Image (tube, rainbow, N blue to C red):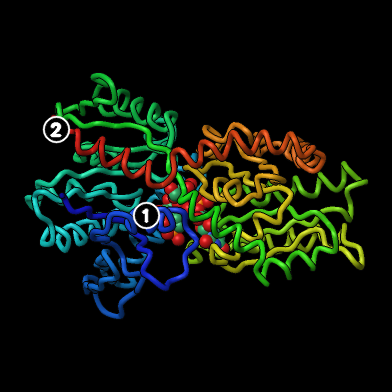
Amino acid sequence: MSRLVVVSNRVALPGASQSGGLATALDAALKETGGLWFGWSGKVARAHSGEVHREAHGEITYLTVDLSREDYEGYYNGFANRTLWPLLHFRLDLVDYNAMTQAAYRGVNALFAEKLAKELRDDDIVWVHDYHLFPLAQELRKRGVRARIGFFLHVPFPSADIVAGLPHHEKTFGALSSYDLVGFQTERDLERFQDYIRLFRGGRVAGQGDLRDHDGRQFVAAAFPIGIDAAAIESLAATAARSPVTKRMHASLNGRALAIGVDRLDYSKGLPERFRAIERFFERHADQRGKMTYLQIAPVSRGGVASYRALRRELEQYAGHINGAHAEPDWTPVRYVNRTYPHPALTGFYRLSRMGLVTPLRDGMNLVAKEYVASQDGDDPGALVLSIFAGAARELDGALLVNPFDSDGVSDAIAAAMAMPREARRERWQSMIARIREYDIHAWRKDFLKTLAATRG
Ligand SMILES: O=P(O)(O)OC[C@H]1O[C@H](O[C@H]2O[C@H](CO)[C@@H](O)[C@H](O)[C@H]2O)[C@H](O)[C@@H](O)[C@@H]1O
Ligand SMILES: O=c1ccn([C@@H]2O[C@H](COP(=O)(O)OP(=O)(O)O)[C@@H](O)[C@H]2O)c(=O)[nH]1
């Protein structure tokens, strides 16, 4: 059987805390198959980039590379997170283009390719993840790698005109045709990518998923909406319901309903807009004051990027403002926490909550939405308020779907979730959990790898 080689910027090394969906998902996927996981070590080296670390845990070998401060700034904080991340989340206004960070990005991809090429065999299946690594296949091919290489984009693919706003966009996005298979979260992302290939690459859609780039290079593109390890989350949540952490949280509510949001502190997650909707909820539904507490868990993310630091300051002020304006001596409307919690604690909090609020302005998938649903007690489940701009909205038809830019609309959905009878909550939950169980993380991995194996005839 072929060996699976996963490549991603972020590697979930055993024991390290993590709060991103990519690491959570790949960890669950690789645990089933075993294989090699290659990526950045998470370490910034004093001198130069390139020191390689190898460690094995069970059936997984982790091969990670240190980056120098300069490369970390240029590649990760720079081109990946100041340029590509806002572009891919439809935020041309936040795109900070710089030829030097673009060169660092290319350089780190070349370095990864150099280190990885030495490890690869022709019959390996290589699966590359996310926007940090668009040019990796091109760099691997230059070094003679012949293995099949697939790519999965965890974030949205925006409209072609937005992509074309990036100077020299063809250098970055044109590199995708070096993969055998390119996967997206949703059909909409796939359609927008096909538009880009037609309109800005002089390529064409040749048939079912089959694309030709302008030079005739053939590759396949398709949608594979990422799932969660539903069985594991369901079982964790059932156990967590009885844990001391959950019990303490329950006691602290004094009989009030809990609403929860769990998001990396990222402008794509729509947190100021959500806080506004919470405030509107208390203003427009005065009878609800003192009856609900909103818990926002928001681990700090990408603190090396100025727009993230500004968001952190804004949210601290906003949480303080809402509490200052609306709290009573014995009730605080918003609990705002910047810590990362492990899944045993999170699933307990989800299960305790009367509603989950997932209202990103743009999100590739949003695993929290799926984890929230999978953590519920099917007999008395909470309701999910979900943005139409999260990839998860395409699958979770039992959620209360909202436009996150419409704070009054979101506040009405919060009111509807609070008032929703148990039978209606059960019905909605059943349709959502059926989909989550059916296309879980293992089905997602199998689907992608089967499609990759079928490329090249
Ligand atoms: O690695 P970081 O810079 O700390 O960021 C964490 C991850 O954020 C993004 O996650 C995405 O992947 C999820 C799983 O497919 C998806 O549900 C979510 O919508 C995406 O935003 C990013 O794409 C990852 O590369 C980061 O590791
Ligand atoms: O304190 C936290 C906050 C988040 N997460 C996990 O981080 C992932 C976030 O993934 P999502 O797709 O929702 O968004 P991303 O952060 O990848 O953009 C989910 O598995 C969460 O359970 C976590 O383990 N602890």
Q: Residue at x 69, y 38 (%)?
A: 426
Q: Position of residue 36 (x, y in %)?
A: 23, 60
Q: Nearer the viewer, residue 139 or 103?
A: 139
Circle 1 residue? 26
Relative horizontal placement of residue 69, taking residue 297 as reference (left or right): left
Can residue 14 be seen here? The reply is: yes
Circle 2 residue? 456
Q: Quadrant of residue 334?
A: bottom right
Q: Position of residue 107 (x, y in %)?
A: 23, 59
Q: Dot 1, how many residues are within 10 Å of its Cα: few (below 14), some (14-19), or many (20+)? A: many
Q: What SS does tag 2 mark?
A: loop
Q: Residue at x 41, y 58 (%)?
A: 23
Relative to 15, residue 218 above or below: above
Relative to 379, residue 320 above or below: below
Q: What SS does tag 1 mark?
A: helix
Identify the mark nearer the N-term, 1 or 2: 1
Distance (Cα) linking label 1 and label 2: 25 Å
Q: Position of residue 394 (x, y in %)?
A: 52, 32
Q: Nearer the viewer, residue 265 or 428?
A: 428
Q: Nearer the viewer, residue 327 or 398?
A: 398
Residue that sits furthest to the bottom in the current view: 46
